[in-house]
Image (spheres, rainbow, N blue to C red):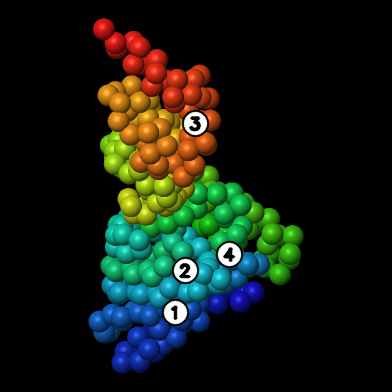
Amino acid sequence: MGAIQLFSTREVPPDRRLDYWNQCARTTFPGMTVDAETPFEAELARWQVGGLVLARPRSRGSRVCRTASPRADEQIVVHLQRRGMVCQRHRGEQVLRPGDLSICTTAAPLELTTQDHEMLVVQAPRAALEQRLPDLDDHFGRTVAGRLPAVRLLHDFVLSLWREGDAGAGDPDWEATVADVLFDLVALALRTSAPAPAPDDLQQLRRLVDARLGDPELRGAALAAELGVSPRWVQHLFASAGTTPGGYILERRLLRAAELLGGPAGRSVTALAFDLGFNDSAYFSRRFRRRFGVSPVAWRAGHRVATSP
């Protein structure tokens, strides 16, 4: 696909248009199928710039589905809504209006319900974008508003490629530069639109930690699985509070230990450590001393003296 290729249902008999369009869709994006009422009308321009596949579909209303590909073959797909509106289902449900951006992964299923619309699509290997955006997984399946300056800049750049046409196709330097600029602009648009953690999100995370302090397997990944979010998002939430998942969990365990040790005599220090999720009582004692300046035994003894009549 070095040169721009153009496809249209215009010259295809109405009863064969959908089959023809499905063939075009599958050869452009493997695993894709299209369903629509007849008579169906659509146009597609597509071309390849190095490792990028660019497509510009225009069509009447349809339902587009794409099955998940193996993780080893994962690509990212950038959608820029040019005209019309699309309902997208990809790790949730989103609505794309003119100008909006979304990014998807071929490792998860995709469904698009379209009206009369036009879209700019870019497919590329995951690795190149992930180098610029380590929290890439957090951005899949969400809509980024087209009114944001960084999204408009990306939109204008992709449109400029189509206006220039394939004049530079085949020149490795030109193709590499185009790919670098595109990845930089996508990363910029996603970074500048990343939602700030909501106070409720952080509070929910804190409550979950407190409820599971006794679980020795409690880590950032376990919290992410419990909340149905990515580990990166959990890290992002804790970073907004100036800490890390492991650091926060340890601090809550130590504070709870100090509270229990300062109360009525009960369980031994070792038993208390295991109750709070520590697998090693010696490690617990070292961390406790580092945090409070005394051993757990001395802390308990000091509180007994302080509360004695």
The residue at the point 40 percent across, 32 percent down is: 269
Between the residue at mark 3 and the residue at mark 1, the CA separation in whole angstroms equals 56 Å
Q: Are marks 4 and 3 in contact (CB under 8 Å)?
A: no
Residue 106: which numbered mark, if any?
2
Element under disc 3:
helix
The residue at the point 46 percent across, 45 percent down is: 279
Q: Earlier in the sequence, mark 4 or mark 3?
A: 4
Image coords of residue 243 (percent x, y): 47, 32
Q: Are marks 2 and 1 in contact (CB under 8 Å)?
A: yes
The residue at the point 34 percent across, 10 percent down is: 306
Judge whether 40 appears above or below 288 on screen. below
Q: Are marks 2 and 4 in contact (CB under 8 Å)?
A: no
Say which of marks 4 and 3 sits in front.
3
Q: Which residue is mark 3?
A: 285
Judge whether 21 appears above or below 193 on screen. below
- Label 2: how many residues lie within 10 Å, few (<14), some (14-19) or many (20+)? many
Image coords of residue 105 (percent x, y): 46, 64
Q: Nearer the viewer, residue 259 or 112?
A: 259
Q: Earlier in the sequence, mark 2 or mark 1?
A: 1
Between the residue at mark 1 and the residue at mark 4, the CA separation in whole angstroms equals 16 Å
- Label 1: how many residues lie within 10 Å, few (<14), some (14-19) or many (20+)? some
Q: Which residue is mark 1?
A: 31
Element under disc 1:
loop
Say which amino acid is labelled 1: Gly
Q: Are marks 2 and 3 in contact (CB under 8 Å)?
A: no
Residue 125: which numbered mark, if any?
4
Between the residue at mark 2 and the residue at mark 4, the CA separation in whole angstroms equals 10 Å
Element under disc 2:
loop
Q: Earlier in the sequence, mark 3 or mark 1?
A: 1
Say which amino acid is labelled 2: Thr
Residue 248 visible from this viewpoint: no
